[in-house]
Amino acid sequence: MKGAIDGSNALIFSKAVLESKNTEETATININGSAGTEDDVAIKYGYMDANLTAFNNGMDASFEAGTSPSDSGSSDWVANVDSSAGTVTFWQRGAPADTGNTAACKIVYTAATSVGALPSVVLTDNGC
């Protein structure tokens, strides 16, 4: 999943550069060139913003909102958006959850914070 996020972001950044939107704090790019907004991706400095729609459209995926890998649902992946921190935490459904101060099995995406800064994608795999 980390590789898929990184790869999608590379393609989205390339499109943002072509549209001269890679230096904008917030912008939107249209992935497939459709007239509607159904495939739009919100970006920050050219990379996916930390929101569920940006990831679902930018990766052509189906993440479900939740707060734990044990949340019920039909998607393989659960995503928790923290808008105030600019992060999205991803768990594979059914993966071990964090316990106490010990992080278990997740990916945390932090959106880019300035021009030229890369987003952060941190994989925690102890306990997976």
Image (cartoon, rainbow, N blue to C red):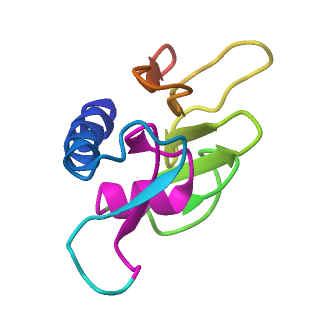
Answer yes or no: is residue 76 visible. no
Q: Judge whether residue 38 is colored magenta.
A: yes
Depth check: give the residue in front, 12 or 103: 12
Q: Quadrant of the N terminus?
A: top left
Q: Residue furthest bottom?
A: 35
Q: Is residue 22 left or right of residue 114?
A: left
Q: Position of residue 84 (x, y in %)?
A: 77, 39
Answer yes or no: is residue 4 visible. yes
Q: Position of residue 47 (x, y in %)?
A: 39, 40
Above or below 2: residue 104: above
Name the residue: 36% across, 47% down: 21
Q: Is residue 46 left or right of residue 24?
A: left
Name the residue: 25% across, 53% down: 19
Above or below 78: residue 114: above
Q: Quadrant of the C terminus?
A: top left
Name the residue: 36% across, 39% down: 22
> Which quadrant would residue 123 be assigned to in this image?
top left
Q: Is residue 61 left or right of residue 83?
A: left
Name the residue: 59% across, 45% down: 69
> Which quadrant would residue 75 be assigned to in this image?
bottom left
How many numbered callouts?
0
Q: Position of residue 25 (x, y in %)?
A: 54, 41
Depth check: give the residue in front, 116 or 120: 116
Magenta stretch: give its range: 37-60
